[in-house]
Image: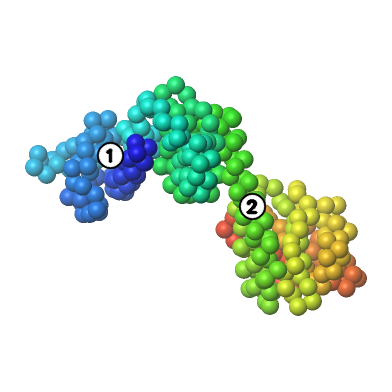
């Protein structure tokens, strides 16, 4: 009950502070209007605390004061400031039946809140901050955005909760990675239902199927999508990791999966971690050489698609292939 209450208070604080941060100066009445669902007394309390800590200054009439952010705003860490007001330094030990691991064994994983699952991964806290507290902090700060949580560096999580040491960080990241791999596996199992009828179909499939590669990969990866004679997707396979060059993207490695799976056509796919999907001269040269090799093998290359974080390029659309 206490943990749930703390999470709600953190969310309320965060909502008010986010609205206050929008403008350099404001009146309380403006904030009330922007936060119609929040109690005015709570909004006033947040503003008063910010004034007390020197982040806000108060000027103007006593009956209608104006508030403005001070120079301290530049160093204002909203999450940390809220955390100090919401989470108490000590936590009473919960009855054994209410502890996350016991609840998991009794009820199953689906019945546990995100904060409880995180607490299990954190395992042990520090003096003054239990694993449950740390789990609540992470859940309150990231909400249901587990994708964002998975991209955090160790130091960033340490700022959210000092209980996140090296072991806890590794366990959290390992669990999230397993979840991603399971999702990718399930997506791969559904791939055969996808039919490529056009370049737009190929782009749509690659955007969805290789979304994680485009978003997270720090090195170039070369993949091949295999298709049957009706251009239904059979599967995709990773060929190599590292800067794409002639030795890595050799026709033998690229087309071996296609021969093994009796594919009739393929789509070549690789990513540019730089964020710019514009093909390099090596990309163009390798594609032409692979096209010649594919023709010799009786395979058709439908496209070579390059992915970046926010963009995607088709060599067919660009009339390079």
Residue at (57% x, 58% y) in the render:
310
Mark 2 highlights which residue?
A: 182
The 10 Å Cα crowd at callout 1, few under 14, some 14 to 19, many 20 or more, is many
Residue at (61% x, 63% y) in the render:
208
Whether residue 10 is visible, yes or no, is: no
Where the C terminus falls, by quadrant?
bottom right
The 10 Å Cα crowd at callout 2, few under 14, some 14 to 19, many 20 or more, is few
Label 2 sits on a secondary structure element that is helix
Where residue 36 appears, x then y in whole percent? 22, 54
Where residue 190 appears, x then y in whole percent? 66, 65
Residue at (82% x, 69% y) in the render:
263
In the displayed structure image, the side of residue 183 where residue 270 appears, left or right = right
Against 77, residue 205 (above or below) is below
In the displayed structure image, the side of residue 293 where residue 9 appears, left or right = left
Where residue 154 appears, x then y in whole percent? 55, 34
Where residue 317 appears, x then y in whole percent? 67, 72
- Which quadrant of the structure image shows residue 53? top left
Mark 1 highlights which residue?
A: 69
Give whichever of 251, 44 is nearer the camera. Answer: 44
Give whichever of 211, 232 is nearer the camera. Answer: 232
Quick check: marks 1 and 2 in contact, CB under 8 Å? no
């Amino acid at each position: 009950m206490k943990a749930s209450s703390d999470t709600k208070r953190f969310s309320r604080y965060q909502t008010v502070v986010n609205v206050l941060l929008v403008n350099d100066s404001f009146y309380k009445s403006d904030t009330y209007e922007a936060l119609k669902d929040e109690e005015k007394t709570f909004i006033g309390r947040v503003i008063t605390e910010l004034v007390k800590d020197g982040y806000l200054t108060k000027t103007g009439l006593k009956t209608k004061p104006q508030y403005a952010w001070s120079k301290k705003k530049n160093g204002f860490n909203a999450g940390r400031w809220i955390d100090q007001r919401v989470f108490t330094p000590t936590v009473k030990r919960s009855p054994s039946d209410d502890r996350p691991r016991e609840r998991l064994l009794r009820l199953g994983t689906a019945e546990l809140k995100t904060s409880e699952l995180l607490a299990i991964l954190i395992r042990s806290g520090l003096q003054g901050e239990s694993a449950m507290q740390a789990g609540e902090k992470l859940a309150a700060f990231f909400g249901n955005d587990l994708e964002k949580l998975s991209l955090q560096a160790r130091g960033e999580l340490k700022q959210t909760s000092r209980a996140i040491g090296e072991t806890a960080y590794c366990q959290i990241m390992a669990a999230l990675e397993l979840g991603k791999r399971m999702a990718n596996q399930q997506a791969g199992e559904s791939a055969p239902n996808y039919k490529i009828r056009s370049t737009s179909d190929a782009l749509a499939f690659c955007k969805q199927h290789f979304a994680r590669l485009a978003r997270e990969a720090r090195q170039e990866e070369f993949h091949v999508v295999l298709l049957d004679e009706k251009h239904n997707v059979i599967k995709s396979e990773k060929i190599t990791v590292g800067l794409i060059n002639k030795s890595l993207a050799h026709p033998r490695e690229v087309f071996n999966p296609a021969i093994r799976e009796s594919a009739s056509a393929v789509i070549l796919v690789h990513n540019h971690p730089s964020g710019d999907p514009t093909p390099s001269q090596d990309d163009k040269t390798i594609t032409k050489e692979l096209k010649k090799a594919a023709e010799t093998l009786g395979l058709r290359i439908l496209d070579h698609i390059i992915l970046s974080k926010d963009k995607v390029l088709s060599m067919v659309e660009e009339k390079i292939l």
